[in-house]
Amino acid sequence: MKLWKTILAAAALSLAAATSAFAARTDLTLGIVLEPPHLDPTAGAAAAIGEVTYANVFEGLTRIDDNGQVQAALAESWAVSDDGKIYTFKLHSGVKFHDGSAFSADDVKFSLDRARAKDSLNPQKPLFAHITDVTAVDPATVKVTLDGPQGNFLYDMGLVAAVIVGKGSADGNKDKPIGTGPFKLDHWAKGSEITLVKNPDYWGTPAALDKATFRIVPDAAAAVPALLSGDIQAFANMPAQDALAQVQSDPRFSVVIGATEGETILSINNKKPPFDKLAVRQALASAIDRGAIIAAASNGLGKPIGSHFSPGDAGYVDLTGVYPHDIVKAKEYLKEAGLENGFSATIKLPPVPYARDGGQVIQSQLKDIGVNLQIIPVEWAEWLSQVFTNKDYDLTIVSHVEPNDIDIYSRPGYYFQYDNPKFNDLIKELDTTVDNDKRLELLGEAQKILAHDVPAVYLFELPKIGVWDAKLQGMWTNWPIEADDLTKVKWTD
């Protein structure tokens, strides 16, 4: 009898070991290029914040899916008044924040009122400017009143900066984010990694992953060895550079080239001489060869753009021919501006490869027309402080990854310091236009104004170079918003 018990116990152990060996894993280490400055998407402009937290930790009334479409999130449904001014949202019941507190309409009211307040630090505060009132009708119903019809309101409510936060935990979200999402923060080792774990009390479909670690890997020199060794199993957008071919030839990995909403531009301080002169900006645009920059800064995968709009979006107008690469014409523009002998300026470059690599090419190209650029490398926090906030710069390179953000050129005090009343009026009309055909017409006009006025030199649309273990499913091909949404990611056997 004892012998049989011993045999059965051994068989059970063997079966358990075999089951464990063939079970799909439930952890993931994901490489990201930039470490977020903090983890509150309602209080910072850095795209890296949303890359980690959107849909994973925080959720909005609506959400944007991998095809760029609006889907229900914390709001299970909504109704719109006949005049387009009142949205009544029916909220999911039984939702809890990660600290155990119950989610209700009061949290929606708190979040939207906080975002639109005079002292709001929300990086997308204009999204909420048309809200005139938010009323918690009952715990599961909230009514939002606008000052007029807004064609993009439901879309805007699904963006990163529109996530819903709890009144009791909002002030601590930078270091200890408390959301309603399927993952919650486990720990953050500054300078190294951010680890999320499955939220066991999630109200919706549970995540397949038990743990997800976001490892900060800023360049290809570190990224490729980490991937090949298995220390990292995925990059939503890999800084592969020249090593991409090596990864593509390895059958262990899936390499998926997708699109982003990242308009990569040479940003110009439009109020700082000599860049306040149109002819100077025209000279810069004419001196720059987009093809050479794309080859150096995006593995040749970026798509050239001539205005602040993604080629993948409806309403895109190809304006790359407005200022073709023409050194002779560029010198003529400088002469028109009274600067035929050229001038000197600085270009501040954040640490992302497309900026550092692209900046060197631009420095060389502008030298051909007598513009001598001093490259100043800055860390991301410095860029946000010096360039974005304090407008202490001449030129810089950055990808604007927020979707449908052509309106930023109409925002008072935005770091471009660009002000065109005609453009501003066009954006105001666009805001209140619901008819889709008319919206596309207005978007085309807005693109043309920017292309001709050159408040920035438009370079290329940032590609998304997804690289991950071939057994991993559910990663986004495209980035309609910059988010590493892990809600449907799982391993196959």
Image (cartoon, grey):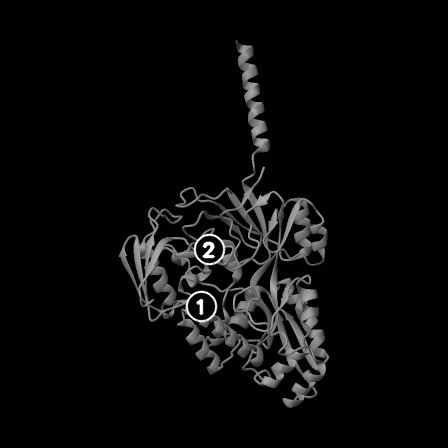
Query: Can you tell which quarter of the image residue 173 is in?
Result: bottom left
Asked if residue 141 lies left or right of residue 463, the reply is: left
Query: Can you tell which quarter of the image residue 490 is in?
Result: top right
Give the label, 2 or 1, closer to the camera: 1
Of the residues shown, which amino acid type is indicated by label 2?
A: Asp
Q: What is the x, y in percent for residue 41?
A: 46, 60
Of the residues shown, which amino acid type is indicated by label 1?
A: Asn
Count of labels shown?
A: 2
Q: Which mark is residue 436?
A: 1
Judging from the image, what secondary structure is the residue with disc 2 in?
loop
Q: What is the x, y in percent for residue 94?
A: 34, 46
Q: Is residue 167 visible?
A: no
Q: What is the x, y in percent for residue 175?
A: 46, 55
* Label pair 2/1, CB-CB below 8 angstroms: no
* Front residue of 437 and 172: 437
Q: Which mark is residue 175?
A: 2
State the residue at coordinates (34%, 64%). 113
Q: Residues within 10 Å of mark 2 (few under 14, many from 20)?
A: some
482 w.r.t. 360: above or below = above
Q: Residue furthest front?
A: 437
State the residue at coordinates (68%, 69%). 293
Q: Residue furthest left?
A: 137
Asked if residue 127 lies left or right of residue 36, the reply is: left
